DNA sequence: CTGAAAGCGCTTACAG
DNA sequence: CTGAAAGCGCTTACAG
């Protein structure tokens, strides 16, 4: 691969002139411009990104710090980021933290902070123009200092203690919408399998649920609320617990699809058919939702959009636009399938 | 963030000395070394990756070109690559080609070559030390020229016309193993839903199937072989076609899980229960496999391992080790669940 | 053991 | 319209 210098000498012009042409400066005669362009074509010359970055002290590269690539949400989030970045001619350096494999089910520990900050420092050393943090799960990030030398945007989580822009999903409205849907199908006694206590997603969905119930004049029975971890096995257990506490409900709203699947497991075990004997709703619209029997009615999460919006905001910030305290919540979409039966 | 020069002047030594310390050279007095290290700690100095890369003309960065991030295989492949890379202190620049969204079901066209080569050239411009191409589907890549200035490794596909190392799965053995398993369960008449014709994965799996049948002294009935696209809908259609052509089989080996799910759909429609009235096997071990009713017996693909091996080989090549004509096939693993019933 | 100097491949004032 | 020169932040012989 030839260099600018060689290219210039082949064309019998100075490197400054070639550089000007490359950068679209207009103060160049048409003749020399054509000659240079022609030679570039012949030689396959490509400017060195590295040299350009060093000189211009901008890399046009964004650092992507990813909690966990194998989280179901990550690929779509990343795809959204990359698509926007590419359209603006930015590159991405990617680093995955392997959060779940390293820290299991209690991921966001003190030790984890160090992992994240080490990654941030590495990105800084690479001289990325900005950073996008892609969380695996909504949480209060806390650890990004307010005085980072480059802008940062949080996707799928947020930070309460300063002004870092964040994009997440509107859990409350989603909880509200699903509950209204359930009510519209005639359900009045709705049980909840809620995911871990003190979980942000769960908390907000529950608030939405209660609001919808209240609006419909329906009472919320605390006996019909069961919490647990976000897995299929725990969905099974939670469903079991529900039936041990009460039989008085016609629908179960699970706060994720995995727990809904576990819920199915238990229902079949006791001879009840979801979508027929009892309504089940999920959340996330993972791939599996459509492959359950019956296909699961659930909430789709705007992952691609969140990724795109995160990239958009970051690039805006790079252009000097302020996004202080920007904590945007994108709407989820109800996907109606076969697991919610109607009650007359 | 301070520079080497500032750091040196704070310590009253030359930049060369600081650089030597940073790079672990031993010809430095303990006293100055301690002073410099101390100052680095105080100032939070970090060397500029960009400047270092320009000077050393190595970036310690690998370009990852990804067919389609949302392919089910990509995240694990990437995770494997990144994990190995990180352990060796390499970074990754990532670019996704959005193959399926751009080119639909006939992805590997002439136009696609240009997309890939554009990406390669961009990586070259960024001066990556090497490239890993992560395919979404096994195919003969063809387009990488043999004289690329940096080494390249193909993961999940291969290239027939030159010496680029490639890692893919051992479809033939996997087809053989699954067939043997089916035979061991008493099945003698096995139908195949094969995926697209002339597909590499499908071709090799079929060869393995035929070998196992032959070894067991079983005949292969061409009527029991149906091809189609890799989707659920086509699995449904293929299963229907199978039943229209013949009723004389006790097991269906689907060449991916999605088609197996479609197969389930049709079976239920005609009142047959998979795993009871008829055996069904899949391929891929996607997330959905365990959520079907009954859970699907299938073949797990060593994606993480392929990614890791690709990264390993690339770094070996960077160290001058030759891997000409390296076309490695990693073994799949049979995951036994509930969809294959036994015949006495 | 330490430092002065060249140079990696560019961009950016600035002079002509 | 064109070019000489400085400099981005490092590393690497080389001299002392």
Image: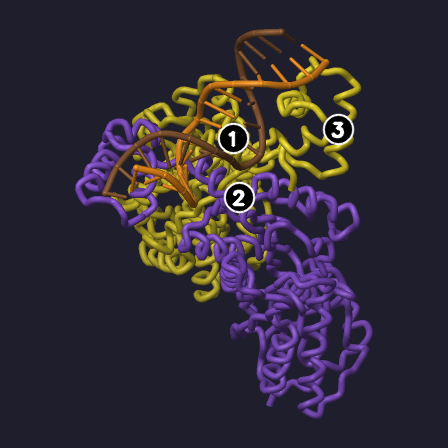
Chain colours: A yellow, B purple, C brown, D orange
For this view, does B301 lie left or right of residue B141?
left
Measured as percent of width and height from the top left, residue B14 is found at: 30, 33
Numbered disc 2: secondary structure: strand
For this view, does A3 lie left or right of residue A246?
right
Measured as percent of width and height from the top left, residue A183 is found at: 49, 39
Q: Looking at the picture, do discs 3 and 1 lie on one chain?
A: yes
In the rendered image, which quarter is residue B281 located in?
bottom right
Callout 3 touching callout 1 (CB < 8 Å) = no
Q: CA distance from mark 3 to mark 2?
A: 28 Å
In the rendered image, which quarter is residue A245 located in?
bottom left
Res A37 label:
3
B23 is higher (above) or lower (below) than B263: above
For this view, does B137 lie left or right of residue D7?
right
Between A238 and A97, the residue placed more toward the observer is A97
Q: Which residue is mark 1?
A: A53
Residue drawn at (65%, 34%) of the image: A6
Residue drawn at (40%, 51%) of the image: A98
Q: CA distance from mark 2 to mark 1?
A: 15 Å
- Pinpoint the chain carrying mark 1: A
B258 is higher (above) or lower (below) than A50: below
- Pinpoint the chain carrying mark 3: A
Q: Which residue is mark 2?
A: B93
Numbered disc 3: secondary structure: helix
Q: Which quadrant does the C terminus of chain B fall into?
A: bottom right
Q: Looking at the picture, do discs 3 and 2 lie on one chain?
A: no
Label 1: few (<14), some or many (≥20) within 10 Å?
A: some
Labels 2, 1: front one: 1
Numbered disc 1: secondary structure: helix
A331 is higher (above) or lower (below) than B149: above
Measured as percent of width and height from the top left, residue B80 is found at: 48, 58
């Amino acid at each position: 691969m030839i260099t600018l210098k060689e290219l210039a000498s082949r064309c019998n012009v100075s490197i400054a002139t070639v550089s000007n042409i490359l950068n679209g400066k207009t103060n160049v005669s048409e003749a020399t411009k054509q000659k240079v362009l022609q030679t570039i074509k012949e030689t396959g010359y490509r400017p060195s990104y590295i040299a350009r970055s060093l000189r211009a002290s901008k890399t046009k590269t964004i650092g992507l710090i990813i909690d966990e690539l194998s989280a179901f949400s990550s690929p779509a989030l990343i795809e959204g980021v990359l698509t926007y970045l590419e359209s603006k001619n930015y590159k991405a350096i990617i680093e995955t933290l392997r959060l779940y494999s390293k820290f299991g089910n209690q991921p966001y520990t003190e030790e984890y902070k160090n992992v994240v900050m080490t990654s941030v420092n590495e990105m800084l050393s690479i001289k990325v123009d900005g950073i996008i943090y892609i969380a695996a799960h909504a949480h209060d990030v806390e650890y990004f200092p307010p005085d980072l030398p480059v802008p940062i945007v949080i996707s799928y989580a947020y930070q309460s203690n300063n002004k870092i822009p964040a994009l997440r999903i509107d859990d409350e409205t989603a909880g509200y919408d699903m509950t209204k849907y359930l009510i519209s199908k005639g359900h009045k006694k709705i049980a909840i399998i809620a995911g871990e206590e003190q979980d942000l997603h769960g908390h907000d969905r529950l608030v939405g649920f209660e609001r919808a119930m209240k609006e419909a004049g329906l009472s919320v029975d605390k006996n019909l609320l069961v919490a647990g971890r976000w897995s299929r096995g725990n969905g099974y257990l939670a469903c079991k617990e529900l039936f041990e506490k009460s039989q008085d409900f016609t629908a179960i709203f699970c706060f994720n699809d995995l727990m809904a699947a576990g819920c199915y497991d238990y229902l079949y075990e006791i001879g009840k058919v979801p979508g027929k004997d009892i309504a089940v709703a999920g959340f996330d619209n993972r791939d599996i939702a459509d492959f359950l029997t019956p296909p699961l009615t659930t909430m789709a999460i705007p992952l691609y959009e969140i990724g795109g919006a995160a990239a958009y905001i970051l690039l805006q910030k790079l252009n000097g636009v302020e996004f202080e305290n920007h904590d945007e919540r994108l709407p989820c979409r109800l996907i109606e399938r076969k697991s919610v039966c109607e009650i007359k």
